[in-house]
Amino acid sequence: MGSACISIIEGNPHLRSLLGWHLQHVGYSVFQSADLHHAREVFFNNQPNLVVLDAELPDGNSLEFCQWLQRQRQALVLMLSARKGEADIVRGLRAGADDYLTKPFGMQEFLARTESLMRRHRTLAPPTHLDYGALKIDLVQRRVRLQGLLIELTPQEYSLLYVLAQAGGEPLTRSELLRRAWPDSIDNPRTIDTHVLSLRKKVETDPRQPSLVQTVRNVGYRLNLEVLKPDPVPYPSLNGNLPPVRVKTGS
């Protein structure tokens, strides 16, 4: 179990440290976060097998973060919550949690649930694609489809789009994009601007007024996932000749 990695995202520092100590004691590699911003960095940098997620984090919506984790298809989620109502548990599971543990809980039960989830993770096949509604990224063939149309991207454009999509709509600085999307060390952040311009020419209806790959002033760039949803407004067809967005319902 030595190589297995677990990310703990818990607002209570005492509980966070206690959980981390016990997981490390039984052999897991553990990373601890007190907020979602740091947790996202941990996910990108360490690719945990399991995420232990506090449902009541003070700095953001844990359910939305859980949904984002589910779209990555790389980690299972154990949600911890003081809310014991059936409706709360259902919301957590429907948001993508693979298990739900109510506070307070015994440490032996926590470790048993963790072990059970890690066994499940070992039997899961690696993800083959990311699905953002109108945007689908094939991780095996390294192909991208937007509203059903295959978009021909260079390897670097693909990597840039993939990293932006993984961020779940959060803005990324040029330095972050260079670190995550470029295979070699590059110290010129303006390289990002050049590739963003070329990417926009392929995925935007009007590259001069981009709605998908957006500039965030004084920060960098973000992928606007809202325009990929059919409700309330579908992403406009490229060149006016793409089919309408169709989104499957259900799980």
Image (cartoon, rainbow, N blue to C red):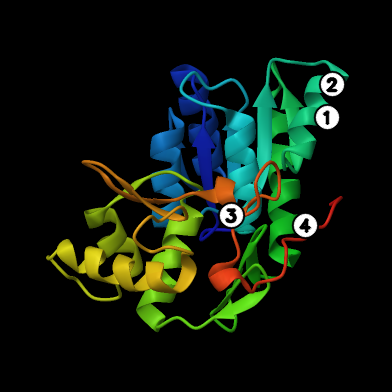
Q: Which of pointers 4 and 2 indicates the residue nearer the eye? A: 4
The residue lying furthest to the front in this view is 240
Mark 1, residue position: 90
Which amino acid type is marked by label 2?
A: Ala
Q: Badge 1: few (under 14), some or many (20 or more) residues near its Cα, within 10 Å?
A: few
Measuring from the top left, give residue 126's x and y in whole percent. 65, 70
Determine which of the numbered discs, if any, sits on residue 247 in the image.
4
Identity of the amino acid at label 1?
Answer: Val
Q: Which mark is residue 200?
A: none
- Name the foreground residue: 145 vs 143: 145
204 w.r.t. 87: above or below: below
Which residue is located at x 19 percent, y 71 percent? 185
Q: Which residue is mark 2?
A: 87
* Secondary-structure class at tag 3: loop
Circle 3 or circle 1, nearest the eye: 1
The structure residue drawn at horizontal position 38% and vertical position 64%, both measured from the top left corner, is 207
Q: Nearer the viewer, mark 2 or mark 3?
A: 2
